[in-house]
Amino acid sequence: MSARPAPKRSRLAGNSPVAPAPAEAPAEQPAPAAPAKKSRPKVSFYQDPDDTARVRAAILHTMTTEGSRGLSQFIHDAVMEKVEQLEARYNGGEPFPPVGPRELPQGRPMGE
């Protein structure tokens, strides 16, 4: 029978949980080779499956006349049209101040 290998020593061995961690030299950041491709962040929402089917059907049956080639573009155009209506009605046609992620109320409204 062969001898058992020696157990590996933990990297935490000998460290105190209250002692500050030793300062490490900052890692060198490589310079970006080329500007990264700008991608739009994904936005998701809940929708009834029947309504989603209607949206897809509307895109499919009107893509040659309306120009929407995909679900994302269709939804973007529809949402921005509504946003422009709200800005015109409530903010003199000017954009509202930006609101960051997680700044809108989340969850179900009370009493629902």
Image: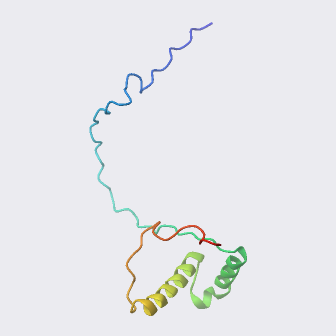
Q: Which residue is located at x 29 percent, y 32 percent?
A: 22
Judged from this view, the residue extending furthest toward the right is 50
What is the image's colouring?
rainbow
Q: Considering the image in quadrants, where does the C terminus appear?
A: bottom right
Q: Which residue is located at x 49 percent, y 83 percent?
A: 80
Rendered location of residue 23, percent (x, y): 27, 35
Residue 89 vertical position relative to residue 57 in the rendered view, above or below? below
Q: Is residue 50 left or right of residue 22?
A: right
Q: Which residue is located at x 48 percent, y 20 percent?
A: 8
Front-most of 46 and 105? 105
Q: In this view, does 55 lie to the left or right of 23?
A: right
Front-most of 9 and 5? 9
Residue 60 vertical position relative to residue 15 in the rendered view, above or below? below
Rendered location of residue 59, percent (x, y): 64, 83
> Which quadrant holds residue 25?
top left
Q: Considering the image in quadrants, where does the N terminus appear?
A: top right
Front-most of 104 and 72? 104
Rendered location of residue 102, percent (x, y): 47, 66
Image mark count: 0
Q: Which residue is located at x 32 percent, y 55 percent?
A: 32
Rendered location of residue 6, percent (x, y): 50, 14
Q: Is residue 44 left or right of residue 13?
A: right
Judged from this view, the residue extending furthest toward the top is 1
